[in-house]
Amino acid sequence: MVQDRFSDFDRREAAARWHAELQDPDIDERIWQAFRAWEADPANAAAYQEIEAALDLLDQSSLADSPSTSSRRPRMPRLLLAGAALAVVLVAALLAVTAASPVRELRPVMHVTEIGERADFTLADGSRIHLNTDTEIEILFSPQARRLHLVSGQALFEVAPGPRPFMVEAGDTETIAHGTIFDIYRREEGVRIALREGAVSVSQNHTAPILLHPGQQALARPGQPPQVTGIDPARIGQWQSGTLAFDNVTLAEAVAEMNRYATTRIVIADPALAAERISGVFPAGEQDAFAEALALYLPLTAENRADRIVLIRADARTD
């Protein structure tokens, strides 16, 4: 029995080491093959799942008690890399927490951004999430899967490799990542999934999944099969720079996008004016500057009225 206890302890220590090793973004195939060979032993696989579950529990506890929506504490895998002794102490502490709460139900962790706000944070597995303006996301990790629910808004995902699937639900779509970088934008007309690197599988209403390759995006509208089109990978996640780039879009489309980033709304008074087309790069949330730039290139004037900016044709009469 003493030997069995030491054996379990050794497996957990090895699992902690593997967990730290797999968070390295530059991990090569040789390491993955060695991990898969080690994990082929059911006892080793169980120890690895135990470590992941304990790390997720600790991460949920710290996030739930933090008033901030973004995590600034050191990543747990970096601590594990400090040495075997520290890994053993950490694992023992985590196992004690888990044992003390055997029936605790996992709770989703919420992250929210307000209008004009962006946020970045790191998950327990090393994945990075970037939230755009006015966005809400739920995160629930279990020993079986890494599940996320994009309730509203837009997020860019940098997925760390791992044995558990990374799944994002948005509307009636489900996206499964395969070690990748992708962007999901949930809006009224549907859900757009755009892939920068790697590969993702996209399904809608549990239908057969569509595999996206870098430079592709899928637009899933309610009641319609997803439509796949091309996109410049450099444009995916460009909003992180705080600028918005428009390429021959209608003024109505550009205004709708600008309005996502500010409480001051821009309103187009003339339907014909809404059909005008524009191109250019503009700072997100700078409504006055945007309106002034429009007046230089389009036949319009901008009027400030309370909490909105009204765009009218230059030759129209105002009240």
Image: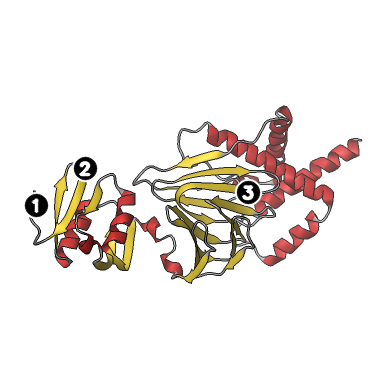
Residue placed at 56% from the left, 44% from the top? 139
In the image, 218 versus 95, the foreground residue is: 218
Between marks 2 and 1 in the image, the one whose residue lies nearer the viewer: 1
Residue at the spot of label 2? 307
SS class of the residue under badge 1?
loop
Residue placed at 29% from the left, 65% from the top? 250
Residue placed at 54% from the left, 66% from the top? 197
Residue type highlighted by circle 1: Thr
Q: Is residue 244 toward the left or the right of residue 69 in the image? A: left
Q: Is residue 318 visible?
A: yes
Quadrant containing the N terminus is top right
Residue at the spot of label 1? 318
SS class of the residue under badge 2?
loop
Residue placed at 33% from the left, 64% from the top? 245
In the image, 31 versus 211, the foreground residue is: 211
SS class of the residue under badge 3?
strand
